[in-house]
Image (cartoon, helix red, strand yellow):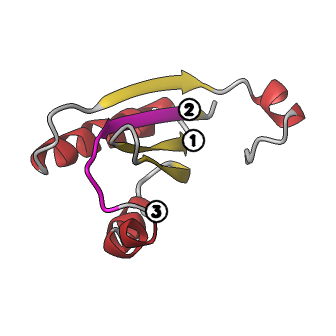
């Protein structure tokens, strides 16, 4: 069963195109994570938050990634990382055009 991981944390920038340019190598690294199907990068300049929505093939892969990524982000000096894991209801999600395998 696919598992969705939602992560957000305080972030002061860069935003938009500057974020894309500065984090291109990180994105390439994340793309190689075991079990990752896709990631949507999120940013909210007004709230000072960034993060992502991830879809993994299984809970074990999502949990392993979360542990590694939380440690990495905290190591950057970010004071808090918020995360939630959700099982995906595939039949209902497919009705609403979710990009599922």
Q: Secondary structure beneath disc 3?
A: loop
- The disc, 2 or 3, on the residue closer to the chain's N-terminal end is 2
- The disc, 2 or 1, on the residue closer to the chain's N-terminal end is 2
Direction front: furthest residue: 46
Q: Residue at x 53, y 52 (%)?
A: 39
Front: mark 2 or 1 = 2
Nearer to us in this view, 77 or 87: 77
How far across and how far down the image is residue 99, in percent? Answer: 74, 47
Nearer to us in this view, 97 or 90: 97
Range covered by the magenta-colored residues: 4-14
Whether 99 is drawn above or below 95: the answer is: below
How far across and how far down the image is residue 85, in percent? Answer: 47, 25
Mark 1 crowdedness (10 Å alpha carbons): few <14, some 14-19, many ≥20:
some
Q: Chief secondary structure of the magenta span?
A: strand
Q: Check disc 2 and report the residue beneath it.
A: 3
Label 3 vs label 1: CA separation? 13 Å
Please indicate whether residue 73 sits to the left or right of residue 16 in the image: left
Direction right: furthest residue: 95
CB within 8 Å, label 2 to label 1: yes
Label 2 vs label 3: CA separation? 16 Å
């Amino acid at each position: 069963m696919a598992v969705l991981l939602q992560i957000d944390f305080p972030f002061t920038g860069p935003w938009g195109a500057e974020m894309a340019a500065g984090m291109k190598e990180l994105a390439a690294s994340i793309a190689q994570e075991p079990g990752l199907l896709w990631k949507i990068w999120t940013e909210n300049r007004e709230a000072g938050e960034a993060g992502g929505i991830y879809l993994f093939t299984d809970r074990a892969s999502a949990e392993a990634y979360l542990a590694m990524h939380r440690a990495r982000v905290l190591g950057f000096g970010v004071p808090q990382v918020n995360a939630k894991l959700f099982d995906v209801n595939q039949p209902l999600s497919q009705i609403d055009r979710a990009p599922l395998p």
